[in-house]
Amino acid sequence: MKYVLTLVYFFLVLSAFGQSLREAAEQLRNGNYVEAEKLLKACESEEGSEVDWFLIAAAVYEKQGLFEQAVDVLKKGYEQNGNRREIAFNLANNLYALDRREEAVEFYGEVLSVDPAYSPAYLNRGNAYLKLGRLSDAVKDYSRVLVLTPDHPQKANIERMISLLTEREIVNEQVTDGGGGKTGSGSTDSHIAEERERRLAEIRKEVEEELAFLDKSKNLQTDNTTLEDYPMNLDIVE
């Protein structure tokens, strides 16, 4: 009898916890961040180790641009729940938003260690590699996105990015080795050098434009894998 009562109590607690999360999710969706925080705090001590709790709590901060707080919440969730894709992915995204690129790369790698076919992690890690100046690594990740998701909604932009980065590497090599050939005069050499610098400047500008688009399109919120039963959508852009 004692066991039955304990079991009933356990399910009642879970039910109340789930209701609080649903209400918090609803408040978050409506932009009522203070109310969402209150609901989350009310159930934190009961079932604070739940993955969903950490995802919603982090989203409350993230929606307000409080990425440091979101990172703190997600790191705690990562420590308590291990390498869960949803937590690691959102942690990496928030680190990226803070320009903590090396750490972001690390956690995108954690995501891919548990789900090697998760193309959003490759796309976002490619962006992080690009900002770190690791162009060949960025190209590899962008290419992997297209292999995993041939009909990706940003396919044209990703293909353009790959093309630009490949050309940039070729032009850089030409600048480094002097073009690999002889020219007729110093003025011709100067003209060739100016043309290369001009093209490099154009490529840099185009790369920045493509990256700005991919950054805007990339998901900085939870991927909704474990939150599909809640009445909300935390994605910034579908």
Image (cartoon, rainbow, N blue to C red):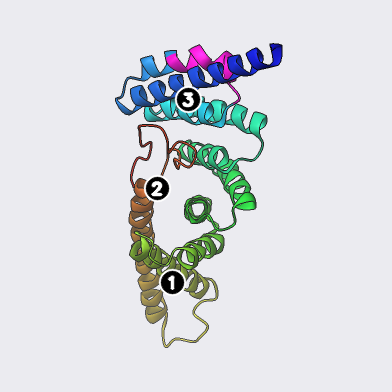
Q: Note whether 6 is above or below 139 in the view shown.
A: above
x, y percent for residue 12: 54, 17
- Judged by its main secondary structure, the magenta piece is helix
Q: CA distance from mark 3 to mark 2?
A: 20 Å
In the picture of the structure, the residue carrying the numbered disc 1 is 167
**Residue 51: horizontal and vertical position, in percent?**
56, 31
The residue under label 3 is 57
Secondary structure at numbered mark 2: loop
Q: Amino acid at mark 3?
A: Ala
Residue 29: image quadrant is top left
The CA span between labels 2 and 1 is 24 Å
**Dots 2, 1 in contact, CB < 8 A:** no
* Secondary structure category for the residue under label 3: helix
- Going from N to C along the chain, the mark reached first, 3 or 2, is 3
Q: Amino acid at mark 2?
A: Lys
Q: Specify the quadrant that holds the N terminus.
A: top right
